[in-house]
Amino acid sequence: MTLQGYKTTMAANSLNTALNDSTASNTTNKTQDSLCLPEVLARPFFIVSYSTVCFVCLALNTITMRVYYCTSLKFQSSVTVYLKNLAAADFFLCLVLPLRIANYANKSTALQHIYCNFGAAGFYLNMYASILFMDYIAANR
């Protein structure tokens, strides 16, 4: 093979590589666009389900906290104390849910920053606190 033929072959190979990279990039973009479709369809579901959970949780935890904290219980076992803390953690989780709902409902950057700084931290802190309280109750029995 001559030097001129070698240069032509190398130029053709680099052109093919560039075309293949471009095609792969377009395929990746199409794949990412199709992956966004389920996320768009899931947003209304999350909004409705979190709203339902928020209202039911608010109502039931308010009743539970009223029973535990506003009535005088003569006998308080360690399980009762754990259940009081579990009810309080669930109630605070319910108070964080509106930030999560607003994050799904709105694409505002400021709201996303507020949610990431406060809402997500509160959500996961309360979720893990509830898990730990349930573990303590199970270990105590």
Image (tube, helix red, strand yellow):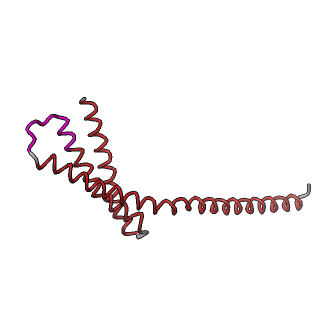
The C terminus, quarter of image: top left
In this picture, is 124 found above or below 118? above
Q: Does the magenta portion include 53?
A: no
Q: Residue at x 52, y 62 (%)?
A: 41
Q: Give 135 or 69, whichever is nearer the viewer.
A: 69
- Judge from the rendering whether residue 72 lies leftward or rightward of residue 79; answer left or right: left
The N terminus, quarter of image: bottom right
Looking at the rendering, the stretch of residues picked out in magenta corresponds to 72-84
- Judge from the rendering whether residue 28 lies leftward or rightward of residue 91; answer left or right: right
- Judge from the rendering whether residue 56 lies leftward or rightward of residue 30; answer left or right: left
Q: Give 140 or 2, whichever is nearer the viewer.
A: 140
Q: Residue at x 29, y 40 (%)?
A: 132
Quadrant of the rendered image containing residue 29: bottom right
In this picture, is 86 found above or below 42? above
Q: Residue at x 84, y 61 (%)?
A: 7
Q: Give 116 or 128, whichever is nearer the viewer.
A: 128
Q: Position of residue 100 (x, y in %)?
A: 36, 60
Q: Position of residue 127 (x, y in %)?
A: 32, 47
Q: Position of residue 91 (x, y in %)?
A: 25, 52
Q: Residue at x 21, y 54 (%)?
A: 62
Q: Does the magenta portion include 78?
A: yes
Quadrant of the rendered image containing residue 102: bottom left
The count of marks equals: 0
Quadrant of the rendered image containing residue 30: bottom right
Task: Please identify the residue farthest to the right as the structure is shown.
Answer: 1
- Judge from the rendering whether residue 31 lies leftward or rightward of residue 82; answer left or right: right
Q: Position of residue 33 (x, y in %)?
A: 59, 63
